[in-house]
Amino acid sequence: MAERGAAGTPARRGETAFSVLSTIGDVLLLQVLFLLTCVGVVTIIPGAIAVQRALPEALAQEHPAIARLYWRNLRWAVRNFWHFGLGVCVVTVVLVFSLLFWASAGDPIRLIGLGVLVPVAGLLVALYLAFLAVVMTSAWETGPRQIGREAWLLVQRKPLHAAGSILLLSTWLLLLARLPTLVLVGTALVPAFLAWWLARDSR
């Protein structure tokens, strides 16, 4: 029995190592697919949605063809959320330019402008992460409006978790500003994991 247990331990370790490597490979594959499909502005948010919906399958190793699952989710997301994605991109550009404008203004006007814009930006980020958290497990027939309502309720129900997600995402963006090459490995994965964590804690 002792010999059998000793012989089985390396095998189990090998299976565990293979499972971990397979999970990492599938997760990184989702990031690569996202980069390939977000060349167009309209496909950035649908690509993020496709990553979000495929992420639980990649982590659980329950789907043998993660790339096929991603493309399936991407087609669904483009068909149902292209207008939402375009709106998010427009709002993001306007918000960034507004923050830069007020940051360069003189005191005390700068403090007033940033005092209004920063909380608004934080709320929008929280809603975006909550949207990803909800869309991750939503049914195929669920519409954007229903997902948006559930995302708003999720932020209201879990304000501390939403605030923690904002803090972590802000830290990631600051790190990204110092190391731009990280955009290749975390553009979609960091928000996806934050939304996944938010969804798990909302249960």
Image (cartoon, grey):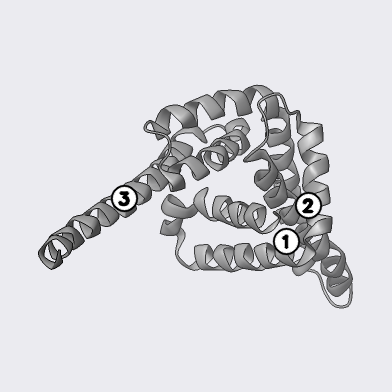
Disc 2 vs disc 1: Cβ atoms closer than 8 Å? yes
Q: Residues within 10 Å of mark 3 (few under 14, many from 20)?
A: some
**Residue displayed at 86% across by 66% down:** 113
Which numbered disc flags the more N-terminal residue, 3 or 1?
3
**Is 143 on the left-hand or right-hand side of 70?**
right
Q: CA distance from mark 2 to mark 3?
A: 32 Å
**Is 95 on the left-hand or right-hand side of 25?**
right
> Could you say which disc has been placed on residue 154 in the image?
2
Element at label 2: helix
Percent coordinates x, y for residue 12 in the rendering = 24, 57
The C terminus appears in which quarter of the rendering? bottom right
Q: Nearer the viewer, residue 126 or 107?
A: 126
Q: Nearer the viewer, mark 2 or mark 1?
A: 2
Q: CA distance from mark 2 to mark 1?
A: 9 Å
**Residue displayed at 61% across by 62% down:** 169
Percent coordinates x, y for residue 83 in the rendering = 72, 29
Q: Which residue is mark 3?
A: 19
> Could you say which disc has been placed on residue 4 in the image?
none
Q: Disc 1 residue type?
A: Ala
Relative to residue 39, is residue 124 depicted above or below? below
Q: Which residue is mark 1?
A: 162
Relative to residue 102, is residue 34 depicted above or below? above
**Is 202 on the left-hand or right-hand side of 53?**
right
Which numbered disc flags the more N-terminal residue, 2 or 3?
3
Relative to residue 196, is residue 5 depicted above or below? below
Which numbered disc flags the more N-terminal residue, 2 or 1?
2
Q: CA distance from mark 3 to mark 1?
A: 31 Å
**Residue displayed at 68% across by 51% down:** 129
Percent coordinates x, y for residue 80 in the rendering = 69, 25
